[in-house]
């Protein structure tokens, strides 16, 4: 395939959020955190296969094959609990390709690490950026449902000590986001950065 001719269709954030919400409703319930590995393995019947040196060779924690039968994951990170939240996001990101980019990924014919390396080496940088940004947005919305995020953030902000802090220091609620992202990240089992992005997304809607 001539990867240089790849054109990624535009998908707006509202559509990506809708697709993430629909996927969650179909494959999960309202419990937190979302059990993304179980969905992949049990419900989608996609094998999760640890692969040595994947991150070193491709600068990726995980990659999904074009026939959707496997997600390869960097072995060292898969067995290291420190990467648990990061890999949850990476798995959700790959499912973003499964949901958003089926036709495109089918044409990529990715069966191995080598195929993926050829893709990232030859695809136009801007088009690859679009592909990854869309999958990241899907993963963020999938793992951090906005309704749940609003509910959980309100619980924290309604804490008497937090209310007192807001009033006594004349702090607006958005300025609290970096602080409340810490407990929220534990609730949703994602990084604090992912929570801050989601909170900012809510603040701007």
Image (cartoon, grey):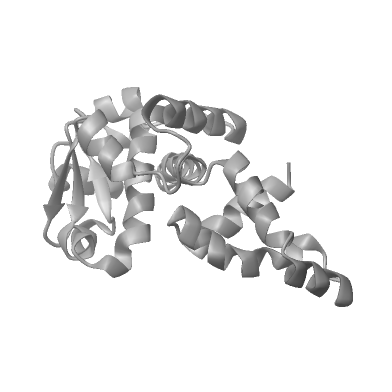
Residue farthest to the front, as pictured: 160
Q: Position of residue 114 (x, y in %)?
A: 14, 47
Q: Residue furthest bottom?
A: 169
Depth check, front residue: 124 or 141: 141
Residue at 20 percent of width and 52 percent of height: 73
Give x and y (percent) for residue 200.
67, 53
Q: Quadrant of the C terminus?
A: top right
For the image, the number of numbered tags is 0
Left-right relation of 26 to 11: left
Decide if residue 105 is on the left or right side of residue 18.
Answer: left
Q: Can residue 122 be seen in the rendering of this structure?
A: no
Quadrant of the rendered structure where residue 69 is?
Answer: top left
**Residue 49 location (% of width, % of height):** 13, 47
x, y (%) of residue 83?
31, 64
The relative height of residue 106 versus residue 171 in the rendered view (above or below) is above
- Give 121 or 109, whichever is nearer the viewer: 109
Q: Residue at x 28, y 55 (%)?
A: 60
Residues 133 and 22: in front is 22
**Residue at point 33%, 43% (across, down):** 36
Locate residue 189: give its quadrant.
bottom left
Residue at the (60%, 48%) spot, across then down: 149
Instruction: Determine whether, in the image, residue 169 is placed left or right of residue 153.
Output: right
The answer to whether 92 is drawn above or below residue 173 in the figure is above
Q: Is residue 129 visible?
A: yes
Q: Quarter holding the N terminus?
A: top left
Q: Is residue 50 above or below residue 28?
A: below
């Amino acid at each position: 395939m001539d990867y240089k001719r790849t054109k990624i269709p535009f998908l707006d954030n509202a559509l990506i959020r809708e697709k993430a919400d629909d996927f969650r409703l179909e494959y999960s319930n309202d419990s937190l955190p979302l059990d993304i590995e179980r969905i992949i393995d049990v419900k989608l019947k996609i094998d999760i296969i640890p692969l040595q040196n994947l991150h070193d060779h491709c600068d990726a924690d995980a990659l999904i094959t074009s026939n959707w039968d496997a997600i390869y994951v960097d072995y060292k990170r898969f067995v290291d609990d420190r990467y648990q939240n990061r890999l949850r996001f990476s798995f959700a990101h790959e499912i973003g390709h499964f949901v958003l980019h089926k036709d495109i990924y089918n044409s990529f014919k990715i069966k191995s690490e080598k195929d993926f390396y050829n893709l990232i080496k030859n695809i136009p940088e801007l088009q690859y950026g679009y592909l990854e940004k869309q999958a990241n947005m899907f993963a963020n919305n999938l793992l951090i449902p906005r309704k749940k995020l609003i509910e959980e953030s309100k619980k924290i902000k309604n804490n008497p000590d937090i209310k007192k802090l807001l009033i006594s220091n004349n702090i607006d609620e958005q300025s609290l986001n970096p602080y409340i992202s810490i407990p929220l990240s534990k609730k949703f089992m994602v990084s604090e950065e992912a929570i801050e992005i989601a909170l900012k997304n809510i603040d701007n809607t």
